[in-house]
Structure formats: C-alpha cells, structure tokens
Image (cartoon, rainbow, N blue to C red):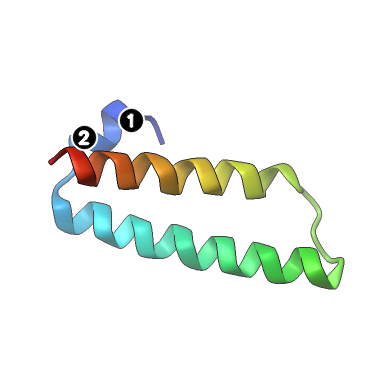
Amino acid sequence: MRTSELRELGREDLLSRLRQSEKELFDLRIQAVQGRMANSAKLKQVKRSIARIKTVLQQE
C-alpha cells in the first residue's frame, strides 16, 4: 500500500494494519526457517509496509 493511501486512513485502521503486517511477517519468518517459503521477496515487502505504517503513525 502506498504512503498516500495510508495517510487517508484513521489511526485505528493503521494500528489494525500494523498488527496484521506484523503477524504476516512472523508467519513468513517461520516459513523461511522451515524452508517452506516460496517467495523470499515477500519478507522485504512486508518489512517496508510495516515501516511505512509506523512512519505515518509517527507523523500524526
């Protein structure tokens, strides 16, 4: 999701997306350790998404 789209969301929606993204990151890390990960680039995407959400939250 783009930063401009994130800025349009409310604080509760951002916090909800942050929790979802952190859970997804946790699941992806487990998959990577177990050797079941099909797309390793997904880790990088999720990390960047978390960083964007945290940045928008901090700017509010």
Q: Which mark is residue 3?
A: 1
The residues tagged by marks 1 and 2 sit, at their Cα atoms, a distance apart of 6 Å
Hey, which quadrant is residue 2 in on the image? Answer: top left
41 lies left or right of 54:
right
Count of number-bearing discs:
2
Residue 30's x, y, as percent?
Answer: 70, 71
Alpha-carbon neighbours of circle 1 within 10 Å: few (<14), some, or many (≥20)?
Answer: few
Amino acid type, residue under disc 2 in the picture: Arg
- Residue drawn 30% across the image and 40% down it: 55
Residue 47's x, y, as percent?
Answer: 53, 47
As drawn, the residue found furthest toward the right would be: 35
Q: Are marks 1 and 2 in contact (CB under 8 Å)?
A: yes
Against 22, residue 46 (above or below) is above
Label 2: element kind: helix
Quadrant for the C terminus in the image:
top left
23 lies left or right of 17:
right
- Residue drawn 25% across the image and 52% down it: 14
* Front one among 8 and 54: 54
57 lies left or right of 38:
left
Residue placed under numbered mark 2 in the picture:
7
- Residue drawn 54% across the image and 63% down it: 24
